[in-house]
Amino acid sequence: MLQTVRSKTIVGVFPSKSNLHFFIHMNISTDSNKTELEQELARHITTALNLDISPEKIDPLAPLYGDEGLGIDSIDVLEISLVLTKQYGVQLRSDDEHNAEIFASLRNLANHIQQHRTK
């Protein structure tokens, strides 16, 4: 008899024994899901903002801005923008109407930088 186990990101099928189901907890590092650019950006963000979280723990799909996710604010966005301009040649302006979308997640930020980088 097989038992299907579902978690947030994985569906697994594991054998059961004597009507007792054995479930395996799979802890997947979000870092393995990041692109190389997303990993670089996570390091830049944690360094620029002096965050107490390791870059590997930043989920590329979690919100960066606002109360959820990293919870960065407009001042943090300015600090990150300075680093990214210097590192990648991307011009991020505080009055850009797309900032909420650009900084919605690490993945969105990486996509924006990939499309607009000059370095």
Image (cartoon, rainbow, N blue to C red):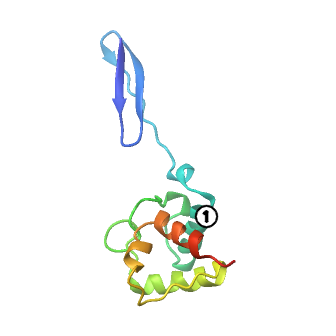
Image coordinates for residue 31, horizontal then vertical, percent = 55, 53
Residue at the (33%, 74%) spot, across then down: 66
- Observer-nearest of 113 and 80: 113
Instruction: Give the number of callouts.
Output: 1
Residue at the (43%, 59%) spot, across then down: 61
Image coordinates for residue 55, horizontal then vertical, percent = 55, 63
Residue at the (62%, 66%) spot, across then down: 40
Q: Is residue 31 above or below residue 94?
A: above
Where's the N terminus, which quadrant? Answer: top left
Q: Quadrant of residue 42?
A: bottom right
Are there few (<14), some (14-19), or many (20+) residues within 10 Å of tag 1?
Answer: some
Where's the C terminus, which quadrant? Answer: bottom right
Residue at the (41%, 79%) spot, across then down: 99
Classify mark 1: helix, strand or loop. helix
Q: Quadrant of residue 82?
A: bottom right
Residue at the far front in the pictured view: 115
Image coordinates for residue 3, horizontal then vertical, percent = 35, 20
Look at label 1 and name its amino acid: Leu
Which residue was labeled with disc 1? 37
> Horizontal placement of 8 versus 39: left or right?
left
Image coordinates for residue 84, horizontal then vertical, percent = 59, 79
Q: Is residue 54 above or below residue 93?
A: above
Q: Is residue 31 above or below residue 65?
A: above
Q: Is residue 17 above or below residue 87?
A: above
